[in-house]
Image (cartoon, rainbow, N blue to C red):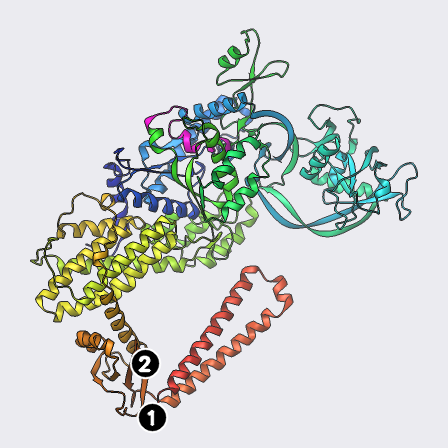
Amino acid sequence: MEKIYKPELIEETLYTNWEKKGYFKPHGDTSKDSFSIVIPPPNITGTLHIGHAFQTTIMDTLIRYQRMKGKNTLWQVGTDHAGIATQMIVERKIAREENKNKYDFDREDFIKKIWEWKKESSSTITEQLRRLGASVDWDRERFTMDKGFSEATKEAFVRLYEDDLIYRGKRLVNWDPKLCTAISDLEIEHKIQKGYMYYFRYPLINRTMTKHSQNYVIVATTRPETILGDTAVAVNPKDFRYKDLIGKKILLPITNRLIPIIADDHANMKKGTGCVKITPAHDFDDYEVGQRHNLPIINILTLNACIRTSSEIFTTDGKKSSVYNTELPKQYHGMERFSARKAIVSELKHLGLVDKIEQHDITIPYGDRSAVVIEPRLTNQWYVRTKSLAKPAIKAVKNGQIRFFPKQYENMYFSWMEKLQDWCISRQLLWGHRIPAWYDSQGKVYVGRTENEARKKNNLNSSIILQQDNDVLDTWFSSSLWIFATQDWPQNTENFRMFYPSNVLVSGFDIIFFWVARMIMMSSYFIKDKNNNSQVPFKVVYMTGLIRDENGQKMSKSKGNVLDPIDIIDGISLESLVSKRCDNLMQTKLEKKIEKNTRQTFREGITPYGTDALRFTLAAIANTGRDIHWDMNRLKGYRNFCNKLWNAGRFVLMNVKHKDYNFKKDKKFEYSLTDKWIQSQCEITTKNFTSHIDNYRIDLAANSLYEFIWNQFCDWYLEFIKFVLTKGQEREKEAARYTLITVLEKTLRLTHPIMPYITESIWKNIKPLMYGIEGDTIMLQNFPQYEDSKYNQEAINNTEWIKKFIISIRNLRYKYKILPNKKLHAIMKINPGEKKYLENNQNLLLSFSKLKKIELINEHDKLPPYVTTMLIGKSELFIVMENLTDKRKELIELNSKMEKIQIKIKHIEKKLDNTNFLSKAPKEIIIKERKKLKHYEETIIKLKEQKIVINQITTV
């Protein structure tokens, strides 16, 4: 083994060998249980970030663990075609390189450009997965636009349509005016911004008056431009102020359209004026009000959110209506929506109809790709009817066929599923699964897997011209089929029967509705057993938290705080990191802020940590919370942990290799109590680790490894062994060496699922020294089992007593600044039940604790002057302190420290009591101040405890 742990020398070589030898493939033994996981398909457009690495670590830990338990394992890998994101990238590419846009190409040529880009660029993610150690079966890699998956997607669409679960209708959707497509809720980022609430007077007609003798009502809005599409004003039916106005008419300003006053609970009596303008075509809540009251729907905006030259008017079921004139004021024709807002407010001021304007915090929806404000828009789209699909999906979770971990996410799942709305599955893009529907000249729709099938099913001859729908399916539609379409569906192959359903789905809670729930619905509908009962897609849903940056912010490209796992593995210079974070920003105005934050956080860039340190860090922080804060200091700590394990491996090799001992399993060794103690600790760790993994507590599993390897094996046992190897009898040395190598080998197998590279490397070096181990890789060895025969409680009691003795002496030296090599005089009143611990280990205690002697006294013997007292189990340990410390000087120093810290505490308390500071300071700053206060308060407690200890140094 190399003297220094250098992950860059071992990782890629090992992975290449694993992949080449087919270790990641299912072994195909059908007599063994199968275990499968599907990877949430990352988008082909980008690179994996730390959140992907987090989930990859969890999945790989689970699959390696089950593989070592002998199961027929499959980790299904693949990528998603990412409709909007991919099309945007290619559009920018052809604009930059060819000075063209998508309209300069016909559909087929533009799609060809995208396939060319994919061929050149899509290997980035797969290479990242390899660097992360992902043991996926690469020969089974899938893509949501590959031939088989495309056929499966068409099959699903056609079956749902034939069963009347897919329909085309005119409804309100989230519309991106820049990309000119409908988008999902997940593709929207809500931002709170300063804006205005406008209060306008809407005139009543026919001399109608309010209870306050006003000939108008006042409505409030943040979007004055939508006035042009108003079709009613709503008041609450219980609002006495407006009860007499229900059914009366209003003359809508600017358009002079007569609209009714209606009664609806949507109007909140305690909010605003109690009067709510209703614009069904441009607000989701208003749309629902319009549906309840059969109001006309007036669209006033173009596809790119400019004012139309004439409005579009529809009935509640999407048919054209002539109830109103379609004319819109000429002065606004073609005007961009925000310019129109200013112009309309100006006109209303001129008309004397502005009551007041107030500053107001507004939540505004932005497209996460386009960075423009999203508009509700009435369009023709394809929808999935979800009510009937939801029922078996809800039942599957309620009856325990599917378990969520953590369990609280079940409530989130039920809450959404029970309020489910029909799902818009069409997008106005070129890249994606083109909808398998064709139209004749009259607009009648025909659905089929191919045009020929559509013609055949509907008896259409070749003279009837059909035009295929230009829209594509929402990426989430094809992704909802991922779990079974990757396993050959709709064919019922041996592969499908072997690996469907999968065992566990690892996913983020933020897509529980968009992906997880929809996979359950689709699987329950399409996959049935021989009795036609719905089959679940997976048995466990493991919901991970969201990794946030060091300031608690969500990581995103637009914020410039994303961490690329490869930069952590290989390291990156500060200048390269700044460049990487600032390049290709959608919002270039943020560049300076991002650069400043990056330079402050990573003053020297990122040093290389290797894959195992990254993986162990991610495993250790995989708690059950929704928010997980990334901490570079923990990463540094776990890199040191890797060093510790590597050095332990070298120590074992140096002390076992070339020694002429027979390590056969049937040989009888005379184990010391410390040998039995470390064996027992190893068994406890094996038992705990297995339990934690089986219960999806990867964090607890990692922490149990850390505690055992660092604190028990390295810090204590290796130190004990050094004493034995230098001063022990030959039979003790032989037993110690056997214990060293067997415990290390078992520990490596235990650790392998989380840290595959370092464990494989050390294991390959110690394997020749072991008896009866076959195979060339640790990943195909049996996972350790708990062996009760190796658990020895007496050995644990003995060694824990020794440790407490040694730690007490070390703490005493630290507190009183006594030199480590200064020999101390120890006196003990030993408990009879603990006397054997002292007798069995006296030489070790004298050596480790640097004691002159351990003098035993009884209850009535007199103690010398200046002693301090410590409890070791049920025994009393006294250390003679004469000439070792100046009690008066120590107390003066402690009092001085406490005074300085008290000043800092008062300063922070004053700051936190200041309401002005609390209202203006960023949340993360306030959190930091509170943490500092807690730290100082805890320090004061510790200093007080030190004063007590010093005062206990008594003159007897």
What is the C-alpha distance between the residues marked 2 and 1?
16 Å
Tell me if 17 is positioned left or right of 942 in this view: left
Image location of residue 547, percent across then percent down = 46, 51
| Sooner in the amino-acid sequence: mark 2 or mark 1 | 2
Q: Residues within 10 Å of mark 2 (few under 14, many from 20)?
A: some
Closer to the camera, 694 or 208? 694
Image location of residue 649, percent across then percent down = 21, 57
Q: Residues within 10 Å of mark 1 (few under 14, many from 20)?
A: few
Closer to the camera, 931 or 839? 839
Name which residue lies at 9% across and 65% down. Answer: 731
Name the residue carrying label 2: 870
- Which image quarter holds the N terminus? bottom left
Disc ID at residue 152: none
Q: Which residues are magenta?
A: 476-494
Extreme residue toward the right, this view: 207
Name the residue type under label 2.
Met
Closer to the camera, 956 or 187? 956
Name the residue carrying label 1: 955
Name which residue lies at 60% across and 42% down. Answer: 366
Image location of residue 639, percent across then percent down = 32, 57
